[in-house]
Amino acid sequence: MASYDAGMSEVELRISDDDRERAAAVLHTAVGEGRLTWSEHDERLEAVYSARTASQLAPQLADLPGGAATGIVPAARATTTRPAMTSRLTSPDAAAGEPLRVMLGKVARRPDVSSGRVEVEAVLGAVILDLRELPAHVVVDVVANSLLGKIEVHVSPGTRLVDAGTAALGKRSLVERRSARGVLPRPDAPTVRLSGHSVLGHVRVHVG
């Protein structure tokens, strides 16, 4: 990743997709820990993916732990000292086949997909599932039920998606990073099959 000089005034280097991804990971972790509300998360995430330079990106991370670890926010401005964060969610893995139910809370999880099935339920809460490192050819069934809650599923570009879920006064949506648009699944691409029901809730898939 390119280094950034906080004193640069005339010419500022443009940030890369990797920089945006690192920044997005900080936001995902922050909402999972309750440091950001979902509306704040969505607003900042939109700003992160539209940012072109470090000065545009840094304000979205300046008040969050891990912001300095991206190399974009100067370390002196970080609110706490933490080990460098990776570009993936850092919550513990879920046991294979074990349903994940969240009520009045927020959980970020990289689930064990060895059983081929992931079941999540959010009631007045929020769940973030990281499925961005699925092996080739694998098929994962995700049963996502939301009641006045929110479920986000993150997948890699080129993942084959099948959404058979339903919504009643709720919402199901797909968000693609700019770099992921137009990327078609390869013959050996992993497949994520979504099902479940959203009642006054939101199930959203992030690609990239």
Image (spheres, rainbow, N blue to C red):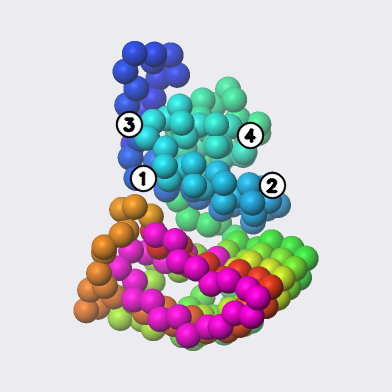
Q: Secondary structure of the magenta portion, mostly?
A: strand
| SS at badge 2 | loop
Question: Which residue is identified by label 2?
Answer: 35
Question: Is 129 situated above or below 2?
Answer: below
Magenta highlight on residue 71 = no
Question: The residue tagged with tag 4: helix, strand or loop?
Answer: loop
* Numbered mark located on residue 18 in the image: 1
Rendered position, 15 above or below 25: above
Label 3 crowd bin: few (<14), some (14–19), many (20+), radius 10 Å = some
State left or right for residue 179 relative to residue 166: left
* Residue on which the image places disc 4: 63
Q: What kind of residue is marked 3?
A: Arg
Residue holding disc 3 = 14
Residue drawn at x 39%, y 13% is 9
Q: Distance between the residues labelled 2 and 3?
A: 28 Å
Start-end of magenta stretch:
152-176
Q: Can residue 106 be seen in this view?
A: yes
The answer to whether one can see residue 30 in this image is no
- Per the model, the C-alpha gap separating discs 2 and 4 is 10 Å
List x then y, in percent, for residue 134.
38, 71
Q: Is mark 1 on a helix, strand or loop?
A: helix
Of marks 2 and 3, the one in the foreground: 3
> The residue under label 1 is which amino acid type?
Asp
167 lies left or right of 140: right
Query: Residue sitting at 39 percent across and 25 percent down?
Result: 4
Give the Cα separation between the discs numbered 4 and 1: 21 Å
**Amino acid type of the residue tagged 2 in the rendering:** Arg
Quarter location, residue 125: bottom right
Instruction: Name the secondary structure under disc 3.
Output: loop
Task: Give the percent coordinates (x, y) of residue 65.
Answer: 62, 39
